[in-house]
């Protein structure tokens, strides 16, 4: 308890306003050793696991460029993500 008689609360991780809007939910299967390392590193850096993994993947894919061509690029879907038809072709 603090001198004022109020208990101290832990620092909550805050999400930037633009960060939450750009994220999508996904699942990944990790080995136990990688999960332990991710948990430890996220604690050391003071971020949540999702933020840490996102930054690691951004760094690893820095040189990757996605270019859309054909009907998908010409329509309103350009830059909006992958359509259901394209997902099947890509194996997603």
Image: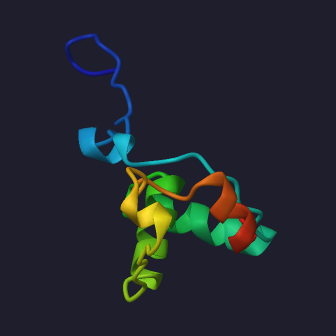
Asked if 54 appears above or below 15 in the picture, the reply is: below
Near-viewer residue (37 or 17): 17
Q: Position of residue 73 (x, y in %)?
A: 41, 65
> Which residue lies at the image location 27% right of the left edge and 21% below the top edge?
2
Q: 4 left or right of 12?
A: left
Q: 50 left or right of 77?
A: right
Asked if 30 appears above or below 61 in the picture, the reply is: above
Q: Position of residue 38 (x, y in %)?
A: 59, 67
Q: Position of residue 44 (x, y in %)?
A: 43, 64
> Which residue lies at the image location 37% right of the left edge and 41% below the top edge?
20
Q: Quadrant of the N terminus?
A: top left
Near-viewer residue (27 or 81): 81
Quadrant of residue 15 within the rendered picture: top left
Q: Quadrant of the C terminus?
A: bottom right
Task: Name, please, the residue furthest toward the top.
Answer: 5
Q: How many marks?
A: 0
> Which residue lies at the image location 50% right of the left edge and 68% below the top edge?
41
Asked if 24 appears above or below 7 in the picture, the reply is: below
Near-viewer residue (52 or 11): 52
């Amino acid at each position: 308890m603090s001198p004022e008689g109020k208990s101290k609360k832990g620092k909550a991780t805050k999400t930037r306003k633009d960060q939450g809007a750009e994220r999508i939910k996904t699942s990944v299967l990790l080995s136990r050793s990688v999960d332990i390392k991710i948990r430890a590193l996220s604690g050391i850096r003071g971020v949540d696991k999702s933020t840490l993994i996102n930054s690691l993947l951004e760094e690893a894919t820095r040189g990757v460029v996605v270019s859309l061509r054909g009907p998908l690029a010409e329509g309103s879907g350009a830059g909006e993500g992958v359509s259901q038809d394209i997902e099947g072709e890509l194996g997603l």
